Amino acid sequence: MNNLPRPTGRSAPPARIIIADDHDLARAGLRAVFDDTRDLAVIGEAADGKAAVELCSQLQPNLAVLDVRMPTMNGLEATRAIKAICPKTSILIVSFHAAPEYVVEALRLGAAGYLLKDASREQILDTARRALSGEALLYGAQAADLLRRAAISDPHDPPVRTSLTPREREVLQHVTEGHTNREIATTLKISPGTVKNHVEHIIAKLDVSDRTQAAVYALRHGLIANH
């Protein structure tokens, strides 16, 4: 799945995070949220998109939290650049705007999720942890529609071969439909833990950073039915 460090001893090292926002107070606020945890650690900050890309290249973080509007290079442009050089880094875009076109573009360029700037501390931490653990960030029919819109195929994309098992394809189909692990487990009559294992294997086999991008990749390359 993503490049989270493997546990050594009793507990795993904290996930490494970088924050990029051109407002000092916004960065300080996000850092305060993450600094108050044991499983998440801010290892770098940037004031513009270009600096965020350079930081990711140097530090290879597990997660990058990017403001959508920044000088030099905005968050969407930075997302594209970061995914090109750090494909295993998951990205959360932060914005004042909830318009679907912003979300679709962020997903298309490689983001795992999309946060509004008025999100609570609990929402920020929950979203970050879900992105890092391969849990669903987008739910239901609206999520499925956003994923389909983000997964516009490129006619120049080469054919894709994968070693997904029939069960993994079944799970992946549900992922693209915006179903959570618990919903998938109920439908397939397996445990949520088994679903989580399948999702982790899917992410690894598709060589993507997170669940959202696994869904986008699958739809873009026709690995499952696009209803």
Image (cartoon, rainbow, N blue to C red):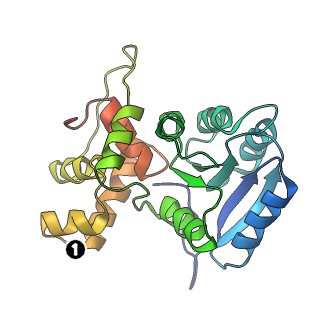
Name, please, the residue furthest toward the right.
24
Residue at image location 56% in from the left, 63% down from the top:
128
Q: Nearer the viewer, residue 88 or 154?
A: 154
Regarding residue 13, the answer to whether it shows in the image is no
In this picture, residue 167 sits left or right of residue 56: left
**What is the number of callouts on the image?**
1
Name, please, the residue furthest toward the top.
156
Q: Position of residue 129 (x, y in %)?
A: 53, 67
Q: Is residue 16 above or below residue 226?
A: below
Q: Is residue 124 above or below residue 92?
A: below
In this picture, residue 57 sits left or right of residue 192: right
Q: Amino acid at mark 1?
A: Ser
In this picture, residue 186 sits left or right of residue 25: left
* Secondary structure of the residue carrying numbered label 1: loop
Name the image quarter holding the C terminus: top left
Would you name the residue on which mark 1 appears? Answer: 191
Q: Is residue 190 above or below residue 214?
A: below
Residue at image location 59% in from the left, 49% down from the top:
91
Q: Position of residue 191 (x, y in %)?
A: 22, 73
Residue at image location 60% in from the left, 45% down from the top:
97
